[in-house]
Image: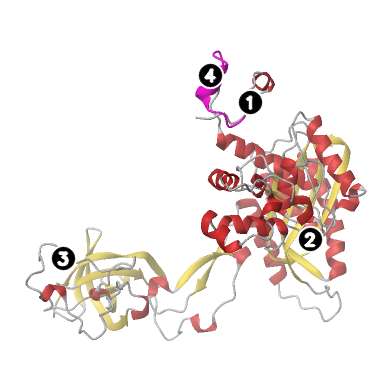
């Protein structure tokens, strides 16, 4: 066990992070230690990272050293809002220090270079094209390597990053692994290193800062309506609309609340957007907590699409589709995205696979080949899973005269069919086995034919897929439409044939009107 962090009193006692716990207790016998709660630290730091999106739209938690502690901001096109890069760095660092944090920062062209400078040369801003020279004097641990790699490099006398320049890359890779070359190239910008933003990236957004924090939800919704008007004007100027809108509430206690809504069709109507957030706020059910107040609100748009200007002339088409989409949006924002679904046809002739449900706000294009054949007679109600029934038939392969379903007997008067539906062989669950490659010049021989092979220990195949085994009894279904003495009409089918190794099975699949 090692020390993950030390306070000021422990530091005065010459204790350092990473020190063995037994050595620390030997130096300070009355040392008080607490077990680190990594999950809690990750969550707190993630929430704290979201708060920095008020400085840059792209904020990520860098997990190379630990899932907390390292924050990466992409400040491309943002530094001028603070004056320049130097002033921006000072503002971000000083406001964290004012909160009681120990913080260091740096600015460079690459994530790797900025990380190394922030840890070992804090406060530096490396101009474009001078990254290699700026990293040359930094210790080798600045490349975010593992302890074993750092130790091995130090034993070879390689203690700074500059000592790796010009050396044989293949030799370094063979001895210390590919990660050494990867981290070096990432730091120098030879390989692009991408970051994963914590919050969705939005090119179009509108925000408002408050001189005094607000806290009531009504004030938040009023501000959201004003921001929707500003954002709608920007989208209209570009001829665009959006399907997803994010309302980010920046609290005074450095936390961010994110409310997201989705529209079924790209829109930029401010009234519609604001009303969706009203419905979304009704679902919070007391979870809304403004803390000590909200000092900034940002409304961002994503999932952009082209939207033509609305025509308000005599030739405008009023087919009601737009009003229906608005209704879908209001219902899903109030009840949830999965509360309202639609049935979509699937290109298959298996009855239980013929349709699937998808959210109306995330509709996909319909397949013309998936439309059902109007000449086929299908029941009004289809059971989710066919249910087994007991059948008594007059002739073996004919329709039943009597069925028992859920312990209730039905006497059949009329029947029509059968309609044969075969399983789709390309979707069957047949296992796939990879055969061994025979040796050159020899014929393939089954080891089970060898009398010396132990039959009690069958040889396992090299690979068996995870698919379920193929059931030959489900390849053919014979469907019947039957009517009982009470006028009830059922849709049943039979699997298997009489006289086979296994007796046929009967199932009830649906009901007609």
Residue under pointer 1:
6
Q: Mark 3 or mark 1: name the one nearer the start of the chain.
A: 1
In 3D space, how far apart are the residues under numbered discs 3 and 1 (Cα atoms)? Answer: 60 Å
> Could you tell whether 469 is left or right of 185 in the image?
left
First in residue order: circle 2 vs circle 4: 4
Q: Are marks 3 and 2 in contact (CB under 8 Å)?
A: no
Separation (CA) of disc 4 from disc 1: 13 Å
| Mark 3 surroundings within 10 Å by alpha-carbon count, few (fewer than 14), some (14 through 19), many (20 or more) | few
Residue 414 makes an appearance in the image:
yes
Nearest-to-viewer mark from 3 and 2:
3
Percent position (x, y) of residue 58?
74, 53
Q: Which residue is mark 2?
A: 203
Q: Nearer the viewer, mark 4 or mark 1?
A: 4
Q: Secondary structure at mark 1?
A: loop
| Residue highlighted by disc 4 | 25
Q: Which mark is residue 458?
A: 3
Say if 233 sits above or below 282 in the image: below
**Element type where label 2 sits in the image:** loop
């Amino acid at each position: 066990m090692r020390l993950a962090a030390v306070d000021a009193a422990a530091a005065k006692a010459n204790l350092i992070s990473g020190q063995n716990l037994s050595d620390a207790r030997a130096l300070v016998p009355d040392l008080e230690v607490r077990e680190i709660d990594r999950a809690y630290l990750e969550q707190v730091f993630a929430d704290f990272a979201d708060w920095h999106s008020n400085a840059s739209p792209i904020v990520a938690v860098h997990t190379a050293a630990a899932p907390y502690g390292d924050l990466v901001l992409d400040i491309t096109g943002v530094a001028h809002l603070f004056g320049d890069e130097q002033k921006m760095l000072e503002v971000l660092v000083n406001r964290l220090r004012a909160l009681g944090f120990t913080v260091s920062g740096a600015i460079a062209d690459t994530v790797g270079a900025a990380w190394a400078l922030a840890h070992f040369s804090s406060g530096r801003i490396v101009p474009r094209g001078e990254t290699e020279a700026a990293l040359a004097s930094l210790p080798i641990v600045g490349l975010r390597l593992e302890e074993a790699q750092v130790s091995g490099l130090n034993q070879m006398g390689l203690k700074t990053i500059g000592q790796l320049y010009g050396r044989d890359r293949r030799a370094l890779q063979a001895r210390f692994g590919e990660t050494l070359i990867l981290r070096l190239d990432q730091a120098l910008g030879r390989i692009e290193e991408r970051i994963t933003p914590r919050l969705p990236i939005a090119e179009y957004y509108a925000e408002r800062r408050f001189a005094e924090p607000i806290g009531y939800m009504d004030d938040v919704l009023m501000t959201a309506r004003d921001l929707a008007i500003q954002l709608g004007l920007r989208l209209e100027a570009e001829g665009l609309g959006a399907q997803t809108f994010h309302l980010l509430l920046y609290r005074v206690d450095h936390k961010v609340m994110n409310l997201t809504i989705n529209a079924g069709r790209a829109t930029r109507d401010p009234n519609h957007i604001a009303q969706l957030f009203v419905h979304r706020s009704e679902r919070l059910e007391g979870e809304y907590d403004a803390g000590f107040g909200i000092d900034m609100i940002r409304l961002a748009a994503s999932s952009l699409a082209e939207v033509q200007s609305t025509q308000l002339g005599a030739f405008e088409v009023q087919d009601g589709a737009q009003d229906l989409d608005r209704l879908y949006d209001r219902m899903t924002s109030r009840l949830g995205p999965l509360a309202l679904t639609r049935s979509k046809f699937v290109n298959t002739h298996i009855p239980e696979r013929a349709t699937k449900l998808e959210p109306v706000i995330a509709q996909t294009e319909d397949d013309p080949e998936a439309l059902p054949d109007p000449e086929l007679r299908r029941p009004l109600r289809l059971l989710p899973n066919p249910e087994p029934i007991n059948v008594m038939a007059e002739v073996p392969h004919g329709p039943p005269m009597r069925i028992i379903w859920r312990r209730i007997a039905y006497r059949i008067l009329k029947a029509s069919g059968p309609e044969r539906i075969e399983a789709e062989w390309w979707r069957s669950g047949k296992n796939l086995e990879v055969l061994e490659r025979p040796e050159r010049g020899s014929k393939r021989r089954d080891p089970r034919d060898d009398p010396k092979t132990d039959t009690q220990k069958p040889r396992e195949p090299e690979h068996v897929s995870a698919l379920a085994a193929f059931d030959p009894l489900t390849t053919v279904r014979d469907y019947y439409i039957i009517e009982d003495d009470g006028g009830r009409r059922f849709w049943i089918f039979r699997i298997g044939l009489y006289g086979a190794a296994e007796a046929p099975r009967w199932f009830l699949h649906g009901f007609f009107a």
